Image: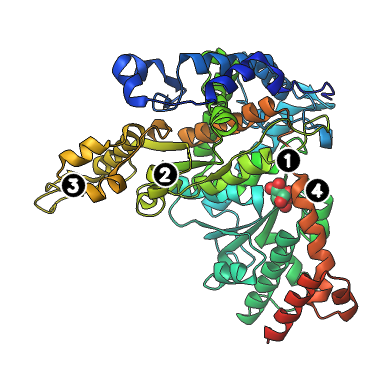
Amino acid sequence: MTESAPVDPTSTDAWKALDGIADGFTPDLRGWFDTDAERASKYTFQAADLTVDLSKGLINEEILGHLLQLAKDVDVAGRFEALISGQHINVTEDRAVLHTALRRPKDGEGLVPPKGFVVDGEDVDAEVHKTLDKVYAFAEKVRSGEWTGVTGKRIETVVNIGIGGSDLGPVMVYEALKPYVQAGIEARFVSNIDPSDVYEKTVDLDPETTLFIVASKTFGTLETLTNARLAREWLWKQLAASGAIDDSDEKKKDAVAKHFVAVSTALDKVAAFGIDPENAFGFWDWVGGRYSVDSAIGTSVVIAIGPDNWREFLAGFHAIDEHVRTAPLEKNVPVLLGLLNVWYSNFLKAQSHAVLPYAQYLHRFPAYLQQLTMESNGKSVRWDGTPVTTDTGEIFWGEPGTNGQHAFYQLIHQGTRLIPADFIAVANPAHPLKDETGDGSTVEAGQDVHNLFLANFFAQTKALAFGKTADEVRAEGTKESVVPARVFSGNRPTTSILAPALTPSVLGQLIALYEHIVFTEGTIWGIDSFDQWGVELGKQLALQVAPAVDGDAAALEKQDSSTKSLIQKYLELRK
Ligand code: F6P
């Protein structure tokens, strides 16, 4: 258990120096590039397949030097070591935090910690690979048609029922790796307790070819268990309606056995739901929900893309884990990006951080990152229970480019707020289409559309960095009264992340990159990035309010006046 008080970052000389620089800071990206021909190469780094260019960020050598000193002062490297070696750095839950163990290769040589390391009496590598092998074997059976539904038909649709980390990761990865999905297998994802979600995801399905995966670390989450029961009811009703099963308990049990599997750390609760523990895939309390996409929580995706691609995905994570473990701080990409975020949010007072993938297959990546970053670092106390000494967390948000360009980029370019943005792109698209006809003027016939797409990626970061001066606007013949509205200040920071292609490995690398950015920031702030007590109060109150919403007058009376009148209005409106 890590009991020592965190270093107060604001007490360090590095922090004070950064504070001094931030006071009256006037970035000058145009000037910095003009006077330093090496700026691009100096600030471009490599982590596995990811090329990361920080040169259009608001940093210079002095700032970076102090940020790196800050990382040393709070012992970022030591905290990473504590994480990968299984120390109980999740102090409020007294748990190890070992998502990095989920992707250690089975037969890897030279692993640190060495292969077969034991945490809390458990051989972590053996446990991880036993479960992975079980998931792979099951996935192969479903993919080959050996696993059938209760009427002997092969599975065509896998419906993952989960929420938060038991949904956002799998759905994001499934969407990102669509080109790798086996023909004839589709995955769907039910998360919201709004009954419309389960209705829409099942309404056109054939129950005989549908497999439900109930994914819940705790197997106690209201949304997931309610949806699982709705799905089970749907299955029984549909199978009975077509005459596939009769209404007997035995047949219903058979149907559940063939159409429901589970992923959870609570195998007793899985059995109580009626799912055979043989058909359940476990994981461990040392995997946080938002860090679990590469555990058995990804079973729906393993079925869709197959074990070989999944191995590649895990190898991608591991490559970044190795980078973060071995690269010196000044070349350590996740650490540098975490430090940069601290600079923007704590010193330059940025409130939010945009993530803008120029890859349509990454369209759920910003939503995934919202849980990863905000559930991890939205904290007001440090790991020793004392108040934080500075702002924590940033609001992460985003949409794929170029869609975002036609929606919210206006504010990033010309608004009053500083919004650092990560631009993510891959060089090789899954579908390299050409615009064979073009429009005869701006778009030539035969134009490679991905090049056109990426021209936007490059252009946006250029516009944000260098802007457009009033003189440049005037030189275009613009009427003087309109000049101010057409000026772009520039100096709006971006980080560009470029990878060869959106392969399973690259996706794993991207996820691990952000996991470690989050940890770097949490370490600077001295917080436990692995608990999430902030979600509990709402869960408790929902159960307390539920009887009132169901019409219980005594429960209604107990509510505050606003909640009471809203519920009354709801009850009036509800038919
Ligand atoms: O909402 C909080 C949370 O605990 C998340 O951290 C987690 O990913 C999600 O609920 C789902 O939890 P479970 O997998 O236990 O159903």
Q: Name the N-terminal-most of marks 2 and 1.
A: 1
Q: For residue 478, which numbered disc appears in the image? A: 3
CA gap between label 3 and label 4 equals 67 Å
Q: Name the N-terminal-most of marks 1 and 4.
A: 4
Q: Nearer the viewer, mark 3 or mark 4?
A: 3
Residue at x 32% of width, y 32% of height? 466
Q: Amino acid at mark 3?
A: Thr
> Badge 4: how crowded within 10 Å, few (<14), some, or many (20+)?
many
User: Residue 549 vs residue 334: left or right?
Assistant: right
Picture coordinates of residue 157 (x, y %)? Answer: 54, 60
> Badge 1: how crowded within 10 Å, few (<14), some, or many (20+)?
many
Report which residue position mark 2 lands on. 412
Q: Amino acid at mark 1?
A: Phe
Cβ of mark 4 under 8 Å from ligand 1: the answer is no
Asked if labels 4 and 3 touch by Cβ distance under 8 angstroms, the answer is no
Using the image, determine if residue 31 lies above or below residue 498. Answer: above
User: Residue 405 vs residue 324: left or right?
Assistant: left
Report which residue position mark 4 lands on. 266
Picture coordinates of residue 560 (x, y %)? Answer: 83, 69
Cβ of mark 2 under 8 Å from ligand 1: the answer is no
Q: Quadrant of residue 286?
A: top right
Cβ of mark 3 under 8 Å from ligand 1: the answer is no
Q: Nearer the viewer, mark 3 or mark 2?
A: 3
Picture coordinates of residue 362 (x, y %)? Answer: 45, 45
Asked if labels 1 and 2 touch by Cβ distance under 8 angstroms, the answer is no
Using the image, determine if residue 499 lies above or below residue 331. Answer: below
Residue at x 67% of width, y 61% of height? 258
Q: Name the N-terminal-most of marks 3 and 2.
A: 2
Q: For residue 283, which numbered disc appears in the image? A: 1
Label 3 secondary element: loop
